[in-house]
Image (cartoon, grey):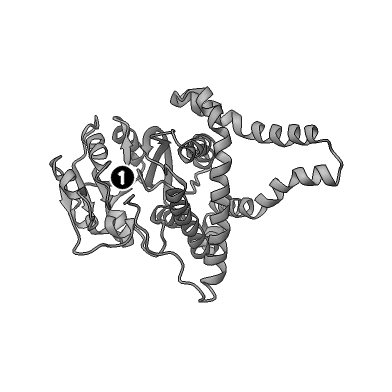
Amino acid sequence: MTAIVPAYNEEAGIGDTIKSLIDQETPFHEIVVVDDASTDRTREVAERYGVTVITPPSNLGSKARAQNYALPFCTGDLVLPVDADTLLAPDYVTRIIEPFSDEKVAIAAGCVLTRHSNTVTERGRMIEYLFGFHWHRPIQSKANSPVVCSGCCSAFRRQELMAFGGFPERTIVEDMDFTWSKQIEGRRAVYVGDAVAYAADPEDFTYLRKQVWRWMAGFFQNVRLHTGNLIRHKPMLALWVLLAVWEILTVPLWYAMPLVWLLVFDWSLETTAMWFFGAELALLLPPLLYGCIRRKVPILHMLASLPFLYLVKAVNFMYAWKALVVELILVPLSLSRGLHDYEKGRA
């Protein structure tokens, strides 16, 4: 297996990432770092670890392009792109290669947890990951229809990737694009819950807004590109995708319900709060408690972080609606080009 580490201005954290790759109990065949014309010391730091470091003549502008630049330098049967701020558990490679004994498997993805949970945004994202990776992902995996194999730590068959033309550059989220494309073709994407990666998530709202805008724009780019084929060839995955769109459309109704209960049905404030927050907690707490127990996350820390989830959700909601308008309305009308260039680096 070959690790690809696309990096743009990641001098602060790339050393820890490379060390986590070198320390795998099942070693990588090779580690290739793509320094995407960084303006800091990313290349210098990476070279200290004795890995292959390549730099394109000019900045490529997206993670997919950087990873495609690295593909000709890869020789392993499998490739594993790893974000330059992500750490892999020591047994990650051992766990993630297991599903590839099935020839139908094209992609395998692990469980992503937050590396840090100190700031408001990090703690809100911690709750999102605990819920998503211990509720949505296992259910989607059991239904053989994962919505996305996370680009920060998913493994791919190299020859299949090359035959596809590399990581898709037509959308801004190459991981989701390839995940849907392969499942439409009849190939399998799988979730490996025992393979754990730790991602450094946005520590402030400035970076959070940038990240969520990319994710939401990419999601609706894929909705625009793939929905027809999903309905025809992968209806279960189409159901998950359309449910996600429906959730985005109806979020305002859900959060308006307390006002309806108060003003229309004349409920008391206490009764309204009890029903609304009771319903929220009934949906959230079981997967969160399970995630805490399985991943050894302190339960009190999780409970104290719950309020911050709603601040992150507010950002998600704002950019989801912006992406819906831009990618599903303005782009088809040729009034916008959409989002196609995005550098993940923190500088």
Look at label 1 and name its amino acid.
Answer: Val
Residue occupying the point 21% across, 47% down? 76
Q: Nearer the viewer, residue 317 or 180?
A: 317
- Residue 99 x/y as whole percent: 36, 38
Name the residue: 44% across, 23% down.
296
| Quarter of the view holding residue 265 | top right
Q: How many numbered tags mark residues here?
A: 1
The answer to whether residue 186 shows anywhere in this view is: no
Q: Residue at coordinates 32% horizontally, 46% vertically from top-left? A: 83
Mark 1 neighbour density, 10 Å: few (under 14) some (14–19) many (20 or more): many
301 in relation to 79, above or below: above
Q: Is 122 or 105 nearer to us in this picture?
A: 122
Q: 136 or 238, which lies in front? A: 136
> Would you place residue 57 above or below residue 26 in this image?
below
- Percent of width and height locating residue 14: 25, 42
For residue 111, side relative to residue 229 (left or right): left
Q: Residue at x 25, y 62 (%)?
A: 59
Q: Which residue is mark 1?
A: 82
